[in-house]
Image: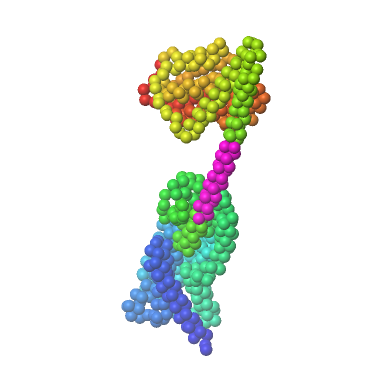
């Protein structure tokens, strides 16, 4: 078989390869219907038509239709690098100046092609004008193809494996086809040995284009192996993770690498951001490169690179699967956290119940024992005791009975507050008068400085006010030091009653347990002061009224307790 015959056969093979490339690109556009696939279809369908028609046209056209077809082939050849460059601009636009320059050069060369008086056949003498035309065509083809190849190669560096390999294959194919065109322009048409090498290079470029444009599934699977390996590791980590934050931290980097995303946001069912990588909230609206993937219990918003929808469509579907597993892992971790928190709460409640029973029994045992001892003493020895002894025992009996009554009342208060059976009936009160009455009843003769405006009124449940203030006053006198300052004010839609003492203040290590039941500092416990229920009851009353009781350190020393209650209709401040 002669070299010419081999070269002719290779010409038909290259025509078939580019025709197949054109068909594949057309099918791709029919399936996707987006700008990149449209430019790809225009690029490869036109060039496939050029190569195929070039094999069918005679070497030296004579008739008008043949000459028109010849000019059309030249126009198609000129358009190929321009359309390839436009394919890259569908992802990342070029500057307006470059766009105008490329369009102008291409349009000028097309006009030159149409205006050619004659196109010499292979081996015929070429005029200076036609030689200049060939050089201009090769230069335009080379420059535009090189720009397109460079843009694809550069953009592929930050893409996942499949997209990167596809983009680089397209880049290599463009360079190979450009090299083939340069060789065609330099090698004489009758030197079939070099022409065979050029034909092989053209066929290789067509196959590389085809592999980059529509790689088979087995090739995609091979390229995708690094991402799949990281995905498997992430899934394994998800199955072992029981904390929602760990789930997010584990999966977000994998999701980002999977599609070369600029940013990924994980959202809960309420669209609250659970975690993000690559950017901070707010979450961008959906657009051409921003898409939302639903997953169990929420969704993910992916800010993809502009190349991802075209080159990474399969990866986006795999990302959807990973998102589903992530949603299930998040649900499982949330359930685990809830179960753990509930278990801790139950254990704490059980511990508090046990402590409550033990402490209540302990607190009641002392007055009960005292009362029992006094009663037995009076019963057995009453007639033998002097009047003074009987009076002392009677006083002790009254004191311990009052202590027991107070403790039982406090326990009943706590039980009613826990059962939400304490009625709240706000009434209009004059704050200063109410405070002075309570001070006279429970702290007569003590150094109490009442700094409340005479006309201040508030709408508040009287029982809540009395119980909270009495507890705060008793606590200040028992654990603090004089003077005790009582003040009140209304502002920012709240009524505030403040009781501040001048003692040493609450020990720092005791602050966290300040409002716990039966909670007493070491000093109070050693001195046998109180039962540790007063502040717990006071805060429960405040919260039953929709308010709160808060503690602050006073300056320069002492403790400051503040009852905060939301204002009711009809309150006023003078």
Q: Quadrant of residue 55?
A: bottom left
Taking the spot 45% from the left edge, 14% from the top edge, the residue there is 433
Prevailing secondary structure class for the magenta stretch in the rendered image? helix
Check the image and name the residue furthest to the left. 64
Q: How many marks?
A: 0
Taking the spot 43% from the left edge, 71% from the top edge, the residue there is 24
Task: Please name whichever residue, 368 or 185, is drawn nearer the observer in this view of the structure.
Answer: 368
Q: Is residue 12 left or right of residue 64?
A: right
Q: Tell me if residue 76 comes above or below residue 230 in the rendering.
A: below
- Residue 47 appears anywhere in the view: no
- Residue 474 appears anywhere in the view: yes
Taking the spot 54% from the left edge, 65% from the top edge, the residue there is 224
Task: Please name whichever residue, 110 or 116, is drawn nearer the observer in this view of the structure.
Answer: 110
Whether the magenta-drawn stretch holds residue 347 is answered as: yes
Q: Tell me if residue 490 comes above or below residue 25 in the rendering.
A: above
Q: Tell me if residue 396 comes above or below residue 156 in the rendering.
A: above
Q: Tell me if residue 421 comes above or below residue 285 in the rendering.
A: above
Instruction: Give coordinates of residue 159: x percent, y percent.
Output: 53, 59
Check the image and name the residue furthest to the bottom. 1
Taking the spot 38% from the left edge, 67% from the top edge, the residue there is 30
Whether the magenta-drawn stretch holds residue 235 is answered as: no
Q: What's the image's color scheme?
A: rainbow
Task: Please name whichever residue, 424 or 333, is drawn nearer the observer in this view of the structure.
Answer: 424
Quadrant (top left, top right, bottom left, bottom right) of the C terminus = top left
Task: Please name whichever residue, 397 or 63, is drawn nearer the observer in this view of the structure.
Answer: 397
Q: Is residue 68 left or right of residue 514?
A: left
Instruction: Give coordinates of residue 209: x percent, y percent.
Output: 49, 70
Instruction: Give coordinates of residue 427: x percent, y percent.
Output: 39, 22
Magenta stretch, residue numbers: 328-354
Instruction: Give coordinates of residue 388: x percent, y percent.
Output: 64, 11
């Amino acid at each position: 078989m002669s070299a010419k015959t081999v070269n002719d056969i290779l010409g038909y093979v290259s025509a078939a390869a580019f025709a197949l490339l054109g068909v594949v690109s057309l099918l791709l556009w029919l399936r996707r219907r987006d700008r990149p696939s449209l430019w790809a279809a225009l690029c490869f369908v036109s060039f496939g038509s050029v190569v195929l028609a070039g094999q069918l046209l005679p070497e030296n056209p004579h008739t008008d239709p043949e000459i028109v077809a010849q000019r059309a082939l030249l126009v198609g050849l000129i358009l190929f690098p321009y359309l390839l460059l436009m394919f890259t601009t569908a992802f990342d636009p070029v500057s307006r100046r470059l766009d105008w320059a490329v369009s102008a050069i291409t349009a000028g060369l097309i006009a030159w092609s149409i205006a050619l008086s004659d196109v010499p056949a292979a081996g015929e003498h070429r005029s200076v004008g036609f030689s200049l035309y060939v050089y201009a065509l090769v230069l335009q083809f080379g420059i535009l193809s090189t720009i397109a190849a460079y843009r694809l190669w550069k953009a592929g560096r930050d893409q996942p494996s499949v997209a990167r390999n596809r983009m680089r294959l397209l880049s290599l194919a463009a360079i190979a086809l450009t090299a083939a065109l340069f060789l065609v322009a330099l090698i004489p048409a009758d030197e079939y040995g070099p022409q065979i090498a050029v034909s092989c290079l053209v066929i290789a470029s067509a196959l590389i284009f085809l592999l980059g444009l529509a790689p088979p599934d087995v090739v995609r699977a091979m390229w995708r192996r690094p991402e799949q390996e990281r995905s498997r590791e992430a899934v394994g980590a998800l199955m072992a993770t029981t904390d929602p934050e760990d789930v997010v931290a584990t999966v977000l980097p994998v999701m980002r690498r999977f599609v070369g995303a600029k940013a990924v946001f994980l959202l809960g069912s309420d669209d609250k951001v659970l975690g993000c990588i690559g950017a901070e909230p707010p979450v961008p609206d959906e657009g051409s490169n921003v898409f939302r993937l639903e997953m169990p219990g929420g969704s993910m918003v992916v800010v993809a690179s502009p190349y991802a929808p075209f080159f990474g469509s399969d990866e986006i579907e795999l990302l959807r699967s990973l998102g589903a597993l992530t949603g299930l892992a998040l649900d499982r971790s949330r359930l685990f956290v809830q179960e753990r928190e509930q278990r801790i709460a139950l254990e704490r409640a059980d511990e508090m119940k046990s402590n409550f029973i033990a402490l209540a029994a302990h607190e009641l045992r002392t007055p009960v024992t005292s009362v029992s001892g006094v009663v037995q003493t009076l019963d057995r020895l009453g007639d033998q005791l002097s009047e003074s002894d009987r009076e002392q025992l009677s006083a002790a009996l009254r004191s311990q009975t009052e202590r027991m009554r107070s403790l039982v009342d406090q326990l009943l208060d706590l039980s009613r507050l826990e059962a939400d059976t304490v009625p709240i009936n706000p009434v209009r009160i004059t704050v200063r008068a109410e405070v002075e009455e309570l001070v006279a009843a429970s702290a007569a003769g003590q150094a109490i400085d009442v700094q409340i405006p005479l006309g201040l009124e508030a709408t508040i449940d009287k029982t809540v006010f009395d119980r909270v203030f009495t507890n705060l006053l008793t606590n200040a006198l028992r654990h603090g030091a004089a003077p005790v300052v009582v003040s009140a004010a209304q502002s920012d839609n709240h009524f505030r009653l403040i009781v501040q003492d001048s003692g040493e203040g609450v020990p720092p290590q005791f602050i966290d347990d300040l409002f716990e039941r039966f909670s007493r500092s070491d000093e109070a416990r050693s001195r046998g002061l109180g039962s540790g229920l007063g502040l717990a009851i006071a805060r429960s009353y405040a919260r039953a009224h929709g308010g709160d009781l808060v503690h602050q350190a006073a300056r320069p020393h002492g403790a400051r307790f503040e009852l905060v209650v939301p204002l009711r209709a009809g309150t006023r401040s003078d």
